[in-house]
Image (tube, rainbow, N blue to C red):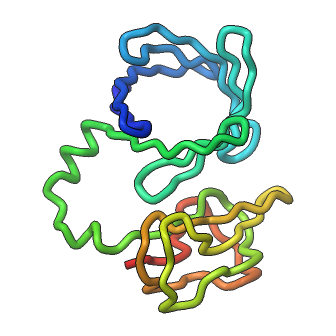
Amino acid sequence: MKLAIQLGSATHTLELSRVEHKVQGTIDGVAVEADCVEIAPGIYSVLIEGHSFEASVEPFGEDLRITIGGRELAVQVRDPRKWHRNHSASASSEVRQNVLAPMPGRVVRVLVALGETVKVGQGIAVVEAMKMQNEVRSPKAGKVERLLVKEGRPVNTGETIAVVA
């Protein structure tokens, strides 16, 4: 799989393949190999050249939020195949943004109200999975146009929690 990712102002090229828990490929032409195991939904144990770390990966709008050692990174992933498929999409698709559940669980708190104005990264709801609570945040600034969950309700991975316009 060949991808372009943007990390801050830098764009990097990745070519990766995965066989079981081994990930091999190149990052900007430099060969890499890692052992990577998903230990919980969205939580990975990674071993690279004898160094071990834990990474949390969660969807953030159309991008990813990756947390490693307490440091949070916003990563934009550009799959050329997806870009070609979506290139002709109308501008109105960018006006509204679905806020999705990153994993299956139960909504323990709804942090916003319908019609409320939210900022980028503001908490929308808290989803509990495997006794861990995860705040689901808004991927964009705007108004909560639809709120599709209630406290105590179960959600599935990728289920729309709210729509921000």
Q: Position of residue 117 (x, y in %)?
A: 48, 84
Q: What residue is at 37 percent from the left and 11 percent from the top?
A: 29
Q: Position of residue 6 (x, y in %)?
A: 38, 37
Q: What residue is at 43 percent from the left and 72 percent from the top?
A: 141
Q: Work out whether 150 lies above or below 9.
A: below
| Lateral position of residue 30 relative to residue 81, left or right | right
Q: Position of residue 55 (x, y in %)?
A: 67, 36
| Lateral position of residue 28 relative to residue 33, left or right | left
Image quarter of residue 105: bottom right
Q: Work out whether 11 lies above or below 140.
A: above
Image quarter of residue 1: top left
Front residue of 121/134: it is 121
Quarter of the image that includes the C terminus:
bottom left
Q: What residue is at 42 percent from the left and 39 percent from the top?
A: 8
- The residue at the far front in this view is 9
Front residue of 149/135: it is 135
Q: What residue is at 38 percent from the left and 34 percent from the top?
A: 5
Q: Work out whether 120 lies above or below 56.
A: below
Front residue of 19/51: it is 51
